[in-house]
């Protein structure tokens, strides 16, 4: 509990004496991130695999906020596995690609990816509070050289004005909530001023890695631009803290529509109990489990990827056990820019004439007599 009686998650002893005002200040959290091996060694028992991962990986930054770091446990901890590099990142795996979704190939302007007729993705920053080890854009996030310039924003807005087929813009990065309130609001306002843009989505992991970033001031500043959709990225129940719950509550109270995009990761969330627990918590906090993504085959993630069979088994075990509202769509984003395919477990057993036989969650068989053509 904090001194004012509100619930809070435990802090690592290194930050036990930090006053609450500093701890709850998102800028303090960013200034005090763990970014070096020396810092890490002073905080936890670093494994050899982690040490080799940190010293060997030069193309993708490592940074963890004190808040998210305080959730870390032993070497197999699901939060640790997402935040601390492992030596496995240095090994190539079959299917690895640098830009698996071919985002860079489909850029009419430097910071805008336009792959599908009605949707576009706007890359607004290279910064994130935590650099997730499974990030699809590890080729550019954390890299100063990929920071967008003002002139690039103007070119992107101009393209969207000239391309009314784009009705849905995903504001992404990096994490758009790494920007100041004023900068973020300016981007949203520019998009909202384009008549053909109907849907604006903010893709952010801040509610997970830096929930202090969700302030009443930010929510009030965004409120006039409704409808605004927020895609969060919770992957494990350990991330479901009182601080994260408060962040989701603020966003939902501010009229933002919340959905979660989980990435299926080996040793993190690759079992039905974990996905069910996460889904129930999200729903209780007004965030709909939207997608369970197959991990993209991005370089350095071979050790985190699961077989597609695992995702199908998880869905099969969830169906009938938890509310359908808590079950995300299982999607594979096709390498090379083919778009998403959603997969479902096959419950059809046989059919003869109009009689179709299906199995339920327990394996019991049921017959449905189909309508005539
Ligand atoms: S917050 Fe998103 S963009 Fe940033 S490192 Fe994590 S997955 Fe990548």
Image (spheres, rainbow, N blue to C red):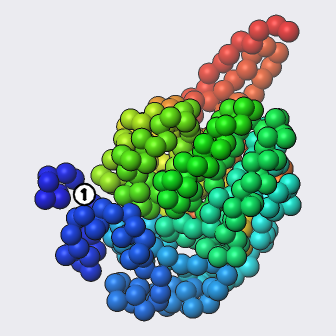
Residue 75 placed where, x, y %? 42, 77
Residue 164 placed where, x, y %? 81, 35
Q: Nearer the viewer, residue 183 or 35?
A: 183
Residue occupying image coordinates x 75% and y 28%? 350
Q: Note whether ligand 1 is within 8 Å of mark 1.
A: no
Q: How many marks?
A: 1
Q: Which residue is mark 1?
A: 8
Q: Nearer the viewer, residue 77 or 349?
A: 77
Residue occupying image coordinates x 47% and y 82%? 35
Residue 120 placed where, x, y %? 75, 46
Of the four image quadrants, the one with ligand 1 is bottom right
Please tell me whether residue 74 is drawn above or below residue 265 in the rendered image. below
- Callout 1: 10 Å neighbours few (<14), some, many (20+)? few
Q: Nearer the viewer, residue 42 or 223?
A: 223
Residue 76 appears in which quarter of the rendering?
bottom left
Q: In the drawing, does residue 5 fall left or right of residue 216?
A: left
Residue 85 placed where, x, y %? 55, 79
- Residue 132 seen in the current view: no
Residue 16 appears in which quarter of the rendering?
bottom left
Please tell me whether residue 153 is drawn above or below residue 279 in the rendered image. below
Q: In the drawing, does residue 107 fall left or right of residue 301?
A: right
């Amino acid at each position: 509990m904090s001194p004012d009686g509100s619930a809070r998650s435990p802090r690592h002893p290194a930050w036990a004496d930090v006053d609450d005002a500093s701890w709850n200040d998102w800028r303090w959290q960013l200034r005090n991130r763990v970014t070096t091996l020396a810092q890490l060694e002073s905080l936890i028992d670093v494994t050899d695999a982690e040490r080799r991962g940190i010293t060997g990986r030069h193309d993708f930054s490592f940074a963890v906020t004190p808040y998210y770091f305080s959730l870390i446990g032993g070497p197999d901890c699901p939060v640790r596995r997402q935040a601390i590099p492992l030596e496995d990142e240095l090994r190539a795996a079959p299917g690895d690609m640098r830009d698996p979704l071919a985002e860079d190939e489909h850029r009419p302007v430097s910071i805008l990816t336009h792959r599908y007729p009605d949707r576009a993705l706007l890359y607004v920053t290279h910064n994130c509070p935590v650099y997730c080890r499974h990030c699809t854009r590890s080729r550019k996030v954390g890299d100063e050289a990929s920071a967008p310039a003002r002139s690039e924003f103007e070119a992107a807005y101009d393209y969207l004005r000239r391309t009314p087929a784009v009705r849905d813009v995903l504001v992404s990065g990096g994490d758009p909530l790494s920007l100041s309130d004023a900068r973020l609001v300016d981007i949203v306002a520019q998009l909202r001023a384009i008549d053909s843009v109907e849907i604006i989505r903010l893709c952010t992991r801040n509610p997970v890695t830096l929930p202090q970033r969700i302030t009443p001031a930010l929510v009030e500043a965004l409120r006039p631009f409704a409808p605004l959709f927020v895609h969060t990225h919770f992957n494990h129940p350990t991330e479901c803290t009182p601080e994260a719950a408060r962040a989701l509550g603020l966003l939902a109270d501010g009229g933002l529509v919340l959905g979660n995009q989980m990435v299926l990761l080996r040793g993190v969330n690759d079992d039905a109990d974990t996905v069910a627990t996460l889904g129930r918590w999200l729903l209780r906090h007004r965030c709909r489990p939207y997608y369970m993504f197959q991990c993209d085959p991005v370089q350095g993630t071979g050790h985190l990827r699961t077989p597609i069979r695992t995702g199908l088994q998880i869905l099969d075990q969830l169906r009938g056990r938890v509310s359908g509202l808590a079950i995300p769509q299982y999607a594979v984003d096709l390498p090379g820019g083919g778009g998403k395919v959603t997969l479902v477990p096959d419950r059809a057993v046989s059919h003869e004439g109009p009689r179709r036989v299906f199995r339920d969650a327990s394996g019991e068989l049921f017959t449905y007599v189909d309508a005539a053509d």
